[in-house]
Amino acid sequence: MDKAHILVVEDSEITLFKLKAVLLRLGYTVTTFPAATEALEWLQKAKERPDVILSDVVMPGMNGNEFIRQVRATPAIAKIPIILLTAQTEMSDKVAGMEAGADDFVPKTISPTELELRIKALLARAQTEQTFSQITAKIITVFSLRGGVGTTSVATNLAVALAHLWNIKVCLWDLALSSGHCAFFLNLKPKGTLTSLADWPDDSVEEPILADMLMKHESGIELMPAPQTASEAELVTPHVVDLIFPYLVSNFAFLVVDGGNHFTDAVLTMLERSDIIVLMLSPELASVRAALDAMQIFEKLGYDPGKVLPVVNCNFTADRLPLKRIESALKKPVFAEIPYDSPLFIQAIHSGRPFITTDPKSDVGLALTNLAYKLSSSEMETVKKG
């Protein structure tokens, strides 16, 4: 297959020269411009479109973010994948770039090997975009910016509840990369994880390899486990997510993702693709503040606010914030409330048996079943009628 055509926009003559040399050595066709205005003019007139745009952020005149907005506003070139080249690593900088329409970020110190992997990942994502638009699996990501609110417990029990409620195939994907505990909560011992795909040379993986990574649980769900050590977490990049995503969404009716409590690149990729984001919080001020922060970031990233559903887990008994006060702060109704039953949560964790299987008629068991129904009934009732 022919190598891709890369457009590089960079005002530093030295950096531009180095990037062009690296990309040519990797076999790519390269077009370069020292200014975003020149690059935009060329893009609007050129007969041959680049496959990927690599652009600096800080440039005189039109900066990288404005350049991206102009590209995204022009229908003929709007879908070209864009990588921002930046020395800025703060979350606010990433949010600004993603809000403008960037697909990925790379540091100016990036190695040629990693740069090529990032480019390949974007090309693969673009090639599978049509496949993604045709999938029917519903993706539910459980997320919070504050730990200790029951994200993993809810994700695990929600997956089991969906499988039992409709007698369907459900996958639980643990993307709480640095502290994933879904396997522990299910009393499973992973033999391998997605980290084995970190250096995968191709744009796709054979289905038997992916199927072998999944762990079957006695409840009927299958688990894609998180890395076994925190040091491996950085190996699960958006490229790795792209390698397995088509398989999971085409082989399961529902994909439940434990998104943990950090905005990693892999989690951001999955949050963007999610049909529903279950935003977990507990009834206390710090948790509400974290939920507000998450919602503001979702808004800046352009997520549909209708897919963000706050769920309150009453994980303590004293001095809880009233539900109405929480809804007033969030300016959004709480979608569901999980009643207090700390002993049952702890027992489920220690035994490795989800409480939805051991105590389905408990208050929390019924609450999770009801949550599962509310999240899935419209799709499943339609399937039944069909």
Image (cartoon, grey):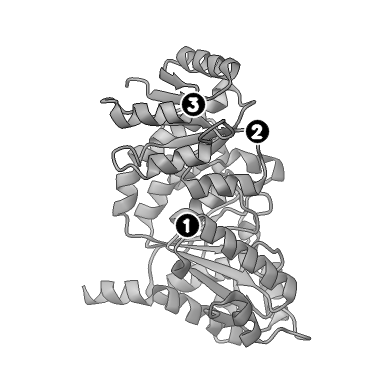
Mark 1 residue crowding within 10 angstroms, few (<14) / some (14–19) / many (20+): some
Q: Give whichever of discs 3 and 2 has the lower sequence position.
A: 3
> Mark 3 or mark 2: which is in front?
3
Res. 35 mark: 3
Name the foreground residue: 379 vs 190: 379
Q: What residue did someone put label 1 on?
A: 302
SS at mark 1 in the image: loop
Q: What residue did someone put label 2 on?
A: 87
User: Amino acid type of disc 2?
Assistant: Ala
* CA distance separating discs 1 and 3: 27 Å
Numbered marks: total: 3
> Is label 3 in contact with label 2 (beta carbons under 8 Å)?
no
Name the foreground residue: 225 vs 94: 94
Q: Does 177 sit above or below residue 148?
A: above
Residue 370 seen anywhere in this rendered image of the structure: yes
Name the foreground residue: 37 vs 202: 37
* CA distance separating discs 3 and 2: 18 Å
User: Amino acid type of disc 1?
Assistant: Gly
The residue lying at 44 percent from left, 78 percent from top is: 374
Q: Give whichever of discs 1 and 3 has the lower sequence position.
A: 3
> Mark 1 or mark 3: which is in front?
3
User: Amino acid type of disc 3?
Assistant: Ala
Q: Left or right: 242 with respect to 114?
A: left
* CA distance separating discs 2 and 1: 24 Å
**Split into 4 quadrants, where in the image is the C terminus?**
bottom left
The residue lying at 33 percent from left, 71 percent from top is: 379
The residue lying at 54 percent from left, 14 percent from top is: 17
> Is label 1 in contact with label 3 (beta carbons under 8 Å)?
no
Q: Left or right: 332 with respect to 75?
A: right
Percent x, y of residue 204: 40, 36
Instruction: Indicate the quadrant where residue 306 lies.
Output: bottom left
Q: Does 335 sit above or below residue 212?
A: below
